[in-house]
Amino acid sequence: MKRPIRSLFSLVLLIAVGTALSYRSAVRHSYFSRPLENITTIGPPIVFNSTLLKFAGIDIGEAKTRQDIDQLLDGDFGHHGHYRSMSSWRRYNHLDEHPRSSGRLPAYLRSPKYNTLWPEFRKLLRTWFRNKRFEPDIMKDLIHVIKRPLDEHYGFVDHGRFYASCAVIGNSGILLKSEYGDLIDSHEIVIRLNNARTDGFQQHVGSKTNISFVNSNILHLCSRRKGCFCHPYGENIAIVMYICQAVHLMDYMLCSASHKAPLLITDARFDVLCTRIVKYYSLKRFVEETRKGPKEWGAAHDGSLFHYSSGMQAVMLALGICERVSVFGFGKSTAAKHHYHTNQKAELHLHDYEAEYDFYRDLVQRPQAIPFLKDSHLKVPPVVFYH
């Protein structure tokens, strides 16, 4: 009798151990396969790595950015007499083939259409660059600098309140495995990224759009089109954009005059905050995985070209203007396309997506563990990731 009981006990124990190990593995690998909701964890006080904080605050590309801005501020493009017409200018600079540099700056900036914009451009550039500093309280200003213009455009009355709910829609191919369309459209505000099309994908990604969030490279391409057309969601949908290169402020000036809806630039202080957060997580992951020092991080992550993704900053924007934030289409799967609407195969090397996923986990489970964001004194709203 004892032997069967002992064998049964051993079998139960083996099943329990196997279940526990399977559960741990599932938890570790299922972050991007199911909705992840806010879980408040109570533990010891968060201790940040002071060395990583220091390196996260160093802008490797600052010298190059300053040089580019000095060239833009000092350049004299007031004389274009040798171009008889716009068509002759285009032929001379081969704009229809590949944009080239003429002198120190891109050739396209010598177009006659930019002549009258230079004085105002330089003023805007100086203001933007002066704001390129670490000031985490910018999170509390997003209501005024971003939400107020949007409210005025859409006819919302209470400019001071947060939006009740916001959905940030990433472009991952995993969206095609779920039908979140109706759920997405039920949010008060829907934010889409980099002009990802919705036609033909409505059951997966919804059809409603209130904010088109793009990087300035997108607008730079749009500025070449007649009327600066950059409205895949309609001409009355507002665009919020962060600046990748200072020269793109010229595209903003050229296009803003023709846009019926607001075309807003994120404050450079907001950009700096996002950069520091992502860089800290990237440094932390690099040091832990390679056992190398943070000084060697730059060589592994394209140094001055390293940048946060549009999706990361769109999530940060939602934190500052929304009472609840839902995130869709973030993450990847070997069984899914990189983008739901394109055939792109690989990720961009200037982004560290794994580091951003670490940030998202903390955002949901331990927002107090996010460096630099804690300095903003922002009350992080509830965040849910759907995958």
Image: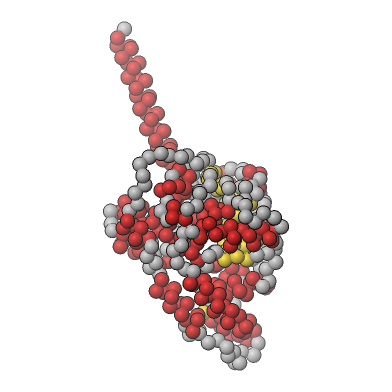
* Image location of residue 107, percent across then percent down: 54, 81
Q: Is residue 28 left or right of residue 223?
A: left
Of all residues, the one furthest to the bottom in this rendering is 81
Relative to residue 330, is residue 195 depicted above or below?
Answer: below
Instruction: Note whether residue 116 is visible.
Output: yes
What sort of colour scheme is used for the picture?
Answer: secondary structure
Relative to residue 181, is residue 9 depicted above or below?
Answer: above
Between residue 230 and residue 163, name the one nearer to us. 163
Relative to residue 263, is residue 356 depicted above or below?
Answer: above
* Image location of residue 264, percent across then percent down: 60, 65
Between residue 176 and residue 20, name the one nearer to us. 20
Between residue 230 and residue 188, name the one nearer to us. 188
Q: Is residue 298 left or right of residue 151?
A: left
Of all residues, the one furthest to the right in this rendering is 155
Instruction: Note whether residue 311 is visible.
Output: no
Between residue 192 and residue 119, name the one nearer to us. 119
* Image location of residue 201, percent across then percent down: 64, 50
Q: Which residue is drawn at 70% across and 63% down?
A: 235
Q: Which residue is drawn at 50% across and 41% down?
A: 38
> For the N terminus, which image quadrant?
top left
Q: Residue at x 51, y 41 (%)?
A: 37
